[in-house]
Image (cartoon, rainbow, N blue to C red):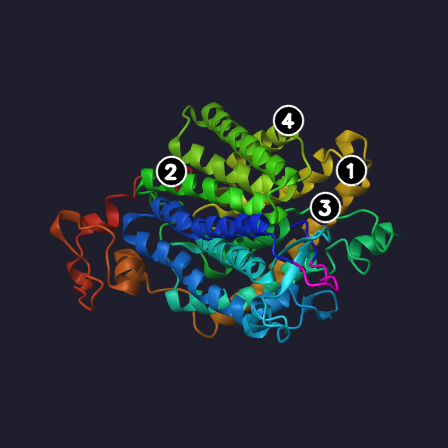
């Protein structure tokens, strides 16, 4: 996110319709990413869990979409900064202030201070989609085993206590931004009223992926392993669904990255190209590791490589060359392919590899930006300062999100409780939590979604066991 919300000039501005249309399209594309993620995650679970997995994404969309309008945008980008950590939730509460600037017209912002005015309402809408998908990403780490009601409560609390403050710190002029009062300015000094070395996070390496990745790890540790983890096979039940989801994520990600420029300009064009380059290279990186390690290049590997490349290029997409993006991407795919196996070595059940993909690639993309930036990167003669700063903001994001997520997760564990019963987990969380089944297996329908639910005792063993054939999503 490269823009600062610049106060309007004294004269009445005019809306730049091209930039506004660009942001409307980009926002819709990012919104599509959450249903795309639901497909991606849903296909990677077992058949008895597909609906619950998809509902966790849609549930995040419902909860976070509401609270972002009420206080989320204000906490992230409001005018009253509180200690560089968050903004006042009251300044823009409900966003009514964005609809009328006092003259009966929508409130406008000047993109880059260059006379390109767009309604602030669409900036709020664009940022809403980021908040939603960040929360939804976490759900993949705790698939198959948590109460849907607890997940919804967590989504609202975590967005408020963790996501909105980190968004403010990085993009809203807070401690992790390039503002004069930020951490970088305190370490490396100030030039012309801003930090001499500006942190690079164009579209969310820290705010979205490191944030969600470490939260997923913390929750996986708090919630605990699925029944049979490491012993019972838990293979993806619908690989085509996974690949469709990955394709939708890739499409929507152009809105995610290019839209973060807030204007259809030359930078957005480079961002589009870099996003494609890194993602394509990450597919190759992942598949090469799979082939060398396992003897096969898999469809799940290709789809996961797509996501790893997209994650890695997110913070760096405005700072790299296309060749640098290829380097970043191929290493992201390789690193993530290696990282997904760590859960078996260390015993944490990150069900759908949120840690292995999002945390790993998010860290690499954030730090890699400091190495490969064409203007300030270490490999381009820019010195060590940018890379050092990238490491610092990554570590701060890890610490803040990890600690706060642990507090929230433990509080919910000892109040509402996270786990469904062992019986419900064995039969299938779809039936237990939603009285539905994703598939009519052998003529059986576990509920209709219209108030009719068949007894769990009638669920055939095939429904709970037929897809349990291998060790984990990327085994």
**Earlier-in-chain disc, 4 versus 2:** 2
Q: Up-down: is 380 above or below 150?
A: above
Q: Residues within 10 Å of mark 2 (few under 14, many from 20)?
A: many
Measured as percent of width and height from the top left, residue 103 is found at: 63, 72
Q: Is residue 415 left or right of residue 433?
A: right
Identify the residue shown where x is 60% and y is 48%. Answer: 260
The residue under label 3 is 391
Q: Which residue is mark 1?
A: 376
Q: Residues within 10 Å of mark 3 (few under 14, many from 20)?
A: some
Instruction: Give whichever of discs 3 and 4 has the lower sequence position.
Output: 4
Left or right, 409 with respect to 200, comes to left
Mark 1 and mark 4: span between their CA atoms?
16 Å
Q: What residue did someone put label 4 on? A: 323
Proximity of marks 2 and 3: CB atoms separated by less than 8 Å: no
Could one spot residue 95 in this view of the protein? Answer: yes
Q: Can you tell which of label 4 and label 2 is closer to the viewer?
A: 4
Q: Which numbered disc flags the more N-terminal residue, 1 or 4?
A: 4
Residues at circles 4 and 2 in contact by the CB criterion of under 8 Å: no
State yes or no: discs 3 and 1 in contact (Cβ < 8 Å).
Answer: no
Residue under numbered circle 2: 243
Q: Earlier in the sequence, mark 3 or mark 1?
A: 1
Report the span colored magenta.
5-13
Label at residue 474: none
Q: Report the front residue among 148 and 110.
A: 110
Q: Is residue 366 magenta?
A: no
Residue 203 visible in the displayed image = no
Give the mark count. Answer: 4
Q: In front: 99, or 186?
A: 99
Q: Quadrant of residue 361?
A: top right
């Amino acid at each position: 996110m490269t823009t600062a919300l610049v106060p309007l000039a004294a004269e009445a501005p005019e809306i730049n319709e091209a930039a506004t249309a660009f942001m409307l399209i980009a926002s819709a594309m990012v919104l599509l990413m959450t249903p795309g993620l639901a497909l991606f995650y849903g296909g990677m679970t077992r058949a008895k869990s597909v609906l619950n997995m998809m509902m966790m994404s849609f549930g995040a969309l419902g909860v976070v979409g509401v609270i972002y309008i009420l206080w989320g945008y204000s906490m992230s980008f409001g005018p009253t900064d509180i200690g560089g950590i968050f903004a006042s939730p009251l300044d823009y509460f409900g966003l009514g202030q964005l609809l009328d600037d006092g003259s009966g017209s929508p409130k406008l912002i000047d993109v880059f201070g260059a006379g390109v005015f767009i309604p602030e309402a669409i900036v709020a809408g664009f940022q809403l989609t980021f908040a939603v998908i960040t929360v939804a990403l976490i759900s993949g780490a705790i698939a198959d085993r948590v109460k849907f009601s607890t997940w919804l409560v967590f989504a609202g609390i975590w967005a408020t206590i963790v996501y909105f403050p980190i968004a403010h710190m990085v993009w809203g002029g807070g401690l992790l931004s390039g503002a004069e009062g930020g951490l970088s300015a305190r370490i490396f000094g100030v030039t012309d009223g801003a930090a001499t070395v500006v942190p690079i996070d164009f579209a969310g390496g820290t705010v979205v992926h490191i944030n969600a990745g470490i939260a997923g790890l913390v929750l996986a540790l708090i919630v605990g392993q699925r029944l049979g983890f490491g012993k019972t096979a838990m293979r993806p039940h619908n690989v085509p669904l996974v690949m469709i989801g990955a394709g939708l994520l890739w499409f929507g990600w152009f809105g995610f990255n290019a839209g973060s420029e807030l204007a259809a300009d030359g930078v957005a064009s480079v961002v589009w190209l870099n996003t494609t380059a890194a993602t394509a290279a990450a597919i190759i990186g992942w598949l090469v590791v799979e082939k060398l390690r396992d003897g096969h290049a898999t469809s799940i590997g290709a789809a996961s490589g797509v996501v790893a490349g997209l994650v890695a290029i997110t913070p760096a997409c405005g700072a790299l060359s296309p060749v640098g993006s290829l380097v970043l991407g191929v290493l992201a795919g390789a690193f993530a392919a290696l990282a997904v196996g760590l859960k078996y070595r260390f015993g944490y059940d990150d069900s759908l590899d949120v840690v292995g993909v999002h945390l790993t690639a998010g860290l690499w993309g954030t730090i890699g930006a400091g190495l490969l930036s064409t203007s300030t990167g270490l490999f381009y003669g820019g010195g060590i300062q940018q890379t050092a700063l990238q490491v610092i903001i990554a570590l701060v994001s890890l610490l803040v999100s990890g600690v706060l997520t642990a507090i929230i997760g433990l509080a919910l564990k000892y109040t509402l409780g996270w786990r469904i019963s062992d019986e419900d987990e064995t039969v299938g969380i779809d039936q237990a939590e939603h009285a539905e089944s994703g598939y009519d297996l052998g003529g059986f329908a576990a509920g209709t979604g219209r108030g009719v639910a068949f007894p769990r005792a009638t669920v055939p063993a095939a429904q709970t066991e037929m897809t349990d054939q291998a060790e984990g999503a990327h085994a």
